[in-house]
Amino acid sequence: MYRLIYISSASDETSISDIRDILSTAVTNNREMEITGLLMYNGLNFMQVLEGSQDDVQPLFEKITKDVRHVSVASILQGEADTRIFAPWSMLFKKAKPDTTDEDHIPEVTMPEIMALEMPDNVRTIIRNFDNLLGC
Ligand SMILES: Cc1cc2nc3c(=O)[nH]c(=O)nc-3n(C[C@H](O)[C@H](O)[C@H](O)COP(=O)(O)O)c2cc1C
């Protein structure tokens, strides 16, 4: 099992409807590839955890890197891992601040739910600190 975490900056034009599209594509594709993970968004930046076989995660990351809906994609952690943190979710979603303009809310996981999962301390710190970043 391989785990990769990256951060990126959302493009100026990226809207909540783009996030909805990204998530629906991610859920469908990732389920097929048995990729699991978490996508966090604070209105300005993304942070994503991708878990699965290295042969699937690396090409997916390369594809995601080229996506114009974000820029400056930077991997912050990658390597072999014993177990999945996010099994059985093909892509959980967490927004740092509730979106008051989004009437039809995207289903979100809460921080206490994420923090209740078993994970290495460094991954826990990355997730918690990202959630504390001020976005918009
Ligand atoms: C922040 C972000 C996260 C994404 N996460 C995933 C993902 O987990 N799985 C996925 O298949 N596509 C993800 N995408 C979308 C891919 O970049 C790409 O648009 C999608 O996989 C469709 O590719 P295709 O046209 O080759 O089918 C993400 C895009 C962005 C901007």
Image (tube, helix red, strand yellow):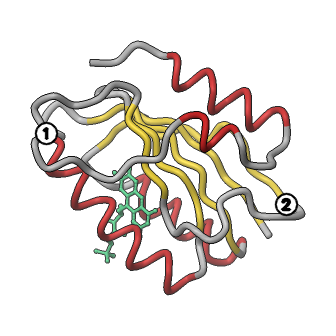
Residue 14, given in percent of the width and then of the height, sits at 18, 40
Q: Quick one: quadrant of the N terminus?
A: bottom right
Check disc 2 and report the residue beneath it: 80
Q: Is residue 8 left or right of residue 11?
A: right
Residue at the extreme bottom: 32
* Residue at image location 73% in from the left, 56% down from the top: 85
**Residue density around tag 2, few if under 14, some if 14–19, many if 20 or more, within 10 Å:** few
Which tag is nearer the camera, tag 1 or tag 2?
1
Q: In this view, which residue lies farthest toward the right?
A: 82
Q: Nearer the viewer, residue 52 or 69?
A: 52
Where is residue 23 shown, x and y percent of the image? 33, 60
Q: Is residue 68 above or below residue 74?
A: below
Say which residue label 1 marks: 102
Q: Quadrant of residue 103?
A: top left
Q: Closest to the observer: 15 or 113?
A: 113
Q: Is residue 53 above or below residue 40?
A: below
Residue found 55% across the figure and 70% down from its top = 59
- Vertical comparison of 85 with 70: above or below: below
58 or 15: nearer the viewer = 15
Q: N-terminal of the two: label 1 or label 2? A: 2
Q: Residue at x 48, y 61 (%)?
A: 91
Q: Which mark is residue 44?
A: none
Q: Position of residue 76 (x, y in %)?
A: 66, 37
Nearer to us in this view, 19 or 9: 19
Q: Amino acid at mark 2?
A: Glu
Amino acid at pointer 1: Asp
CA gap, disc 1 and disc 2: 37 Å
Residue 89 located left or right of residue 87 = left
At numbered mark 1, what does the secondary structure look like: helix, strand or loop?
Answer: loop
Dot 1 crowding, Cα within 10 Å, few <14, some 14–19, many 20+: few
Mark 2, secondary structure of its residue = strand
